[in-house]
Image (cartoon, rainbow, N blue to C red):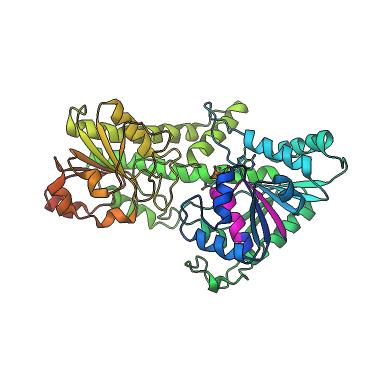
Amino acid sequence: MKVCIIGVGYVGLVTGVCLAEIGHNVICVDNVEAKIEKLKKAVSPIYEPGLEGFIEKNLKAQRLKFTTDIKYGVQNSEIIFISVGTPSLSNGQADLSYVEAVAAEVGKYINGEKIIVNKSTVPIGSGDWVSMIVSESIQKNNPDKNVKFSVVSNPEFLREGSAIGDTFFPDRIVIGSSSKSAIDKMLELYSPLIEQSFDWHSIDIPRLLPKGQKVPVVVSDLTSAEMIKYAANSFLATKISYINEIANICEKVGADILKVAEGMGLDSRIGPKFLSAGIGWGGSCFPKDVSALAYIANEYGMTPQILNSIINVNREQRLKIVKKVQDELKIVKGKTISVLGIAFKPNTDDTREAPSISIMNSLINLGARIKAYDPVVKEKPQTLSEKVILSQDVYDSIKGADLLILTTEWDEFKNLDFSKIKSIMNNNIIIDGRNLFDREKLLKLGFKYIGIGR
Ligand SMILES: NC(=O)c1ccc[n+]([C@@H]2O[C@H](COP(=O)([O-])OP(=O)(O)OC[C@H]3O[C@@H](n4cnc5c(N)ncnc54)[C@H](O)[C@@H]3O)[C@@H](O)[C@H]2O)c1
């Protein structure tokens, strides 16, 4: 089938590349020319394990094209995905200006019957709203006033860092629309994934689904599909905030959160995932999606008590790390602190709403000197204080530090040479914000080890 993806970021690029890999003809459109130029040369603008190989393969097979020409993309496809960003406004509401701009452009150029798919995470009711924007734009700008289209909500659940595997082997596919024919077309598009009939042997990533198992599909109305995405992300964020609150109680009563989480997670009704206590959730999805859902509830005169609580628990969790630093160093001003990990989680270069950034900025405000290192993030994010020194080598970032904070649980940090670290640090205090390190080993080596909830 002929597909156009508008917005070639973490979601759009992975979706486009994977749809090409299962045999569709995909045109990926973005308005950032530098990004498209890179992609035409099979260079990925984002760090996502395995992605570049698939870009190269599908470019060569001519199933994948990259362009800044939205008219070309719209007019040469039957299914048009909108996958631009929907960041938070300062009041928590989702910023739909990118979606709006794209919907208007689609309306301008649309020719023949098309399906417009909201892949972006959008507030409840946005499907109808996109329909309205497209219709208005058709009436204003399109020579063919009678052109037909349907809107589908197809929320995305991929995780950065394992986005390719999540796309080929998803837990479920959600399709919401009031148009039966649009739903049927979407089922046809995804059929190789649903049936798992694509050539997954040729894909060099672990197969995440048991052999023979099909991917469940949830077909719903537009509103329910939009709600599923917000409700799922908010639930996952709730799980993390819950375990962080339990971890904070563990610290007071002398329990070990690792044992507590193990004991809880073995209950099949709870499950072990998202029970890792740490410095809180961040990234490009949870913070904005939880806030957007809370905003929607407020719009309907409700007080979303659980959502408000998890937002607060999460904010405080980051502050707790700063408090731990103050407890240890007493005077933070003039002290050197090494921070390991900038990305909001491992295996991605995404630093949006990364807890590490707010922690570093707070410590800079307290007068600390921060040396930070990340295996992949090599340029300073705009939201990070200018004063933070970015090291290109992990041991450089630790040299002379009075305290070390682990903020992102990259594999690289599991195997650090702690004897060397002991010899180059000024003071041997480690705050393990992700409970990644071997506490006993560090204690034996003479470090003061401070974890989360233990
Ligand atoms: N990142 C994730 O892990 C993830 C997971 C599930 C859902 N989502 C949702 O998917 C959506 C996209 O997220 P993302 O992380 O991929 O965002 P992103 O910021 O990485 O990508 C958005 C892309 O859209 C492009 N763009 C913006 N306006 C455009 C326009 N007018 N024409 C063409 N291109 C335009 C930008 O240049 C950018 O490349 C968001 O709504 C997000 O909530 C993200």
Q: Is residue 331 left or right of residue 132?
A: left
Query: In terms of image quadrants, where is residue 331?
Result: top left
Quadrant containing the C terminus is: top left
Is residue 439 in sight in this rendering? yes
Q: Nearer the viewer, residue 320 or 51?
A: 51
Q: Is residue 412 left or right of residue 417?
A: right
Q: Give residue 4's position: percent from left, percent from top.
A: 69, 52
The residue that appears at 60% across and 62% down in the rendered structure is 59
Residue 77 lies within the magenta run = no
> In this picture, which residue range is highlighted in magenta?
2-18
The residue that appears at 57% across and 69% down in the rendered structure is 213
The residue that appears at 51% across and 50% down in the rendered structure is 45
Q: Give residue 198's position: percent from left, percent from top.
A: 62, 70
Q: Nearer the viewer, residue 201 or 52?
A: 52
Is residue 453 in sight in this rendering? no
Query: In terms of image quadrants, where is residue 367?
Result: top left
Q: Give residue 26's position: percent from left, percent from top.
A: 67, 57
Quadrant containing the N terminus is: bottom right
